[in-house]
Image (tube, helix red, strand yellow):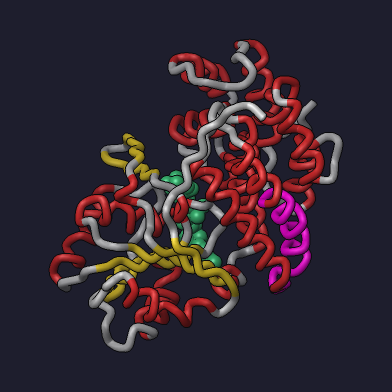
Amino acid sequence: MDSFIYTGLPARVVFGAGTTARLGAEADALGMTRPLVLTTPPQAADGEALAALLDGRAAGVFSGAAMHTPVSVTDAAMAVFERSGADGLIAIGGGSTIGLAKAIALRTDAPQIAVPTTYAGSEMTPIIGQTEDGVKTTRKTLKVLPETVIYDVDHTLSLPPVMSLTSGMNAVAHAVEALYAENANPVLSLMAEDGIAALVRALPAIAAGPDDRAARRDALYGAWLCAVCLGSGGVALHHKLCHVLGGSFDLPHAETHTVVLPHALAYNAPAVAPAMERLARATGSADPAGALYDLARAGGAPTALKDLGMPEDGIDKAVEITFKNPYWNPRPLERDAIRAIIRAAWQGNRPV
Ligand code: NAD
């Protein structure tokens, strides 16, 4: 076996159905006496329900979390945090809510409990992206890594089927790239293969029956493993392309990952034979890129960037930006081939 470096990140994980019942005990273990509960406007009732589990200890519920962690929202939440004398953070929601908890932890060092309700995976990463005046900046620091994560299958049942699929594909993308990232290693590869297999099994079952609890459990378990891959592993062409496209054309996060993943994977496939062997096992297909495209399409997820609002003349702009900031990728970036995959993703073609 080649030499490698593996970096494990500290995290306490409570996994299962009904695990939110442990919230009070988990808050105690972190020394929280007045935790502030965070969520988005549509999930305000979930936030209130969590606060009610804390027997009057909650400092309040702030339900203003928004996509891409705007600094203005963090400022507003900070004011509530300070005014209420809060000493801990409990985030219930997807990447947007968990991002807000991270932003407050960055400023205060307050301990965090994350209760993820999507499959995006932010809860397992030391990464925070924040937006100010339309500019998104990303930082990596252990200060933002949640101390405890409560994965509760019950909170994922309400995630609508198509959002479940796009969010699940977002998770799959983390694991796919960890398999061939510059710092790929056999430990993360085990998690990546298992995580992708669980999601590929679960997502069609969730599309057919969103209340399928066994499928929901598999999907959440897979999402956790894929999130570990994002937190401890590396990324390559796929994540960089999504960053460029999302940032340049204001495209939705999970949907962009869903559309781009099959194309980025097809581009890298000739250069990453061992990763493709694992992906063939995980997807049950000799053509993993095609299988992921088919999975998205069959479940009614978007498959074309043009349907997400990207203009056709954005293709050349995306190529330009992609080549302005070169980065590591297992297959060297070739301008014409990159333009071809962005066009195929824009058009919604099945990858070749
Ligand atoms: P999100 O958190 O923005 O949620 C999307 C919408 O779905 C919100 O309105 C939310 O309230 C709702 N929702 C969430 N869970 C639900 C449920 N179970 N039932 C019903 N509605 C539900 O979406 P996301 O895809 O989880 O997160 C995207 C954001 O997270 C982006 O800003 C992205 O950059 C960030 N992110 C960061 C990291 C990281 O490591 N820092 C990793 C992944 C994503």
Whether residue 123 appears in magenta in the rendering, the answer is: no
**In which quadrant of the rendered view does residue 30 lie?**
bottom left
Residue at image coords 33%, 54%: 102
Whether residue 221 is visible to the viewer of this picture, yes or no, is yes
Query: Left of 129 or right of it: where is 341?
Result: right
Residue at image coords 52%, 22%: 318
Image quarter (top left, top right, bottom left or bottom right) of the N terminus: top right
User: Would you say the magenta stretch is mainly helix, strand or loop?
Assistant: helix
Total labels drawn: 0
**In which quadrant of the rendered view does residue 190 lie?**
top right
Q: In this orientation, which residue lies closer to the viewer: 180 or 352?
A: 180
Residue at image coords 71%, 56%: 198
Whether residue 311 is visible to the viewer of this picture, yes or no, is no
Is residue 54 depicted above or below 90 in this figure?
below
Residue 261 image point, x, y percent: 65, 36
Magenta part of the chain:
195-212
Whether residue 197 appears in magenta in the rendering, the answer is: yes
Is residue 133 depicted above or below 100 in this figure?
above
Residue 219 image point, x, y percent: 66, 60
Is residue 100 depicted above or below 309 in this figure?
below
Q: In this orientation, which residue lies closer to the viewer: 193 or 311?
A: 193
Query: Left of 159 or right of it: where is 27?
Result: left
